[in-house]
Image (spheres, helix red, strand yellow):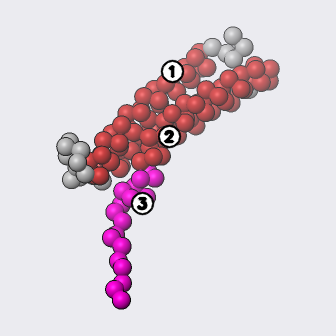
Amino acid sequence: MAVATHPPHGYWEQTGLARLVFAVLAGPTAVSANMFAGYALTKWACATGHTFVLTSIAVLSLMFALTGAWVGWTCRAQLLGANEQGQRIIDRSYFIAIVAVGFSLITALLIVLQAYATLILSPCE
């Protein structure tokens, strides 16, 4: 009776895939959380005078989005043998890593623009 052996799983089939998914979704999740928390807490911040809460939520969201960009960048850096033909898994992973960095940086810029209004105007305006 022959023993069946399974081919070894590559990096991108285990933890690398999870890192790529996190990198792609971190930025949009951060923007969504920032907008949701900002809208939900604006009346409370106006009533209590705790405007720093809105700023701290924006800072935490910005850090989360930049973490997604960093994870995407480190995934991209580990894909040294990728080319632009797109025939292998490593090539497609390279493309997704670049897209993840772009998404996260664009959403980080969006969070900064949303926080700018919070810093200049008070929540009561």
Question: Could you tell me if the residues under marks 3 and 1 are in contact, i.e. CB atoms within 8 Å?
Answer: no
Residue 79 locus on image (x, y percent): 27, 52
Residue drawn at the location 47% of the way across and 43% of the way down: 67
Q: Residues within 10 Å of mark 3 (few under 14, many from 20)?
A: few
**Residue 14 disc label:** 3
Which residue is at the front of the view, 92 or 35? Answer: 92
Q: Amino acid at mark 2?
A: Ala
Work out which residue is located at the far top of the displayed protein and give it: 125
User: Counting residues from the N terminus, which is met first, the one under dot 2 or under dot 1?
Assistant: 2
Q: Which residues are magenta?
A: 1-19
The alpha-carbon separation of the residues under discs 2 and 1 comes to 18 Å
User: Vertically, is 84 above or below 120?
Assistant: below
Looking at the image, residue 63 lies above or below residue 14:
above
Q: Residue at x 35, y 42 (%)?
A: 96
Which of pointers 3 and 2 lies earlier in the amino acid sequence? 3
In this rendering, does residue 62 appear at all?
A: no
Q: Amino acid at mark 3?
A: Gln
Q: Secondary structure at mark 1?
A: helix
The quarter of the picture where residue 31 lies is top right
Q: Residue 66 at x, y = what percent?
A: 46, 38
Residue 102 horizontal/vertical position (percent): 37, 33
Mark 2 vs mark 1, foreground winner is: 2
Assess whether residue 89 is covered by the magenta stretch: no
- When the figure is inspected, residue 69 is found, relative to residue 110, above or below; the finding is below
Residue annotated with mark 2:
26
Q: Which residue is mark 1?
A: 113
Q: Amino acid at mark 1?
A: Leu
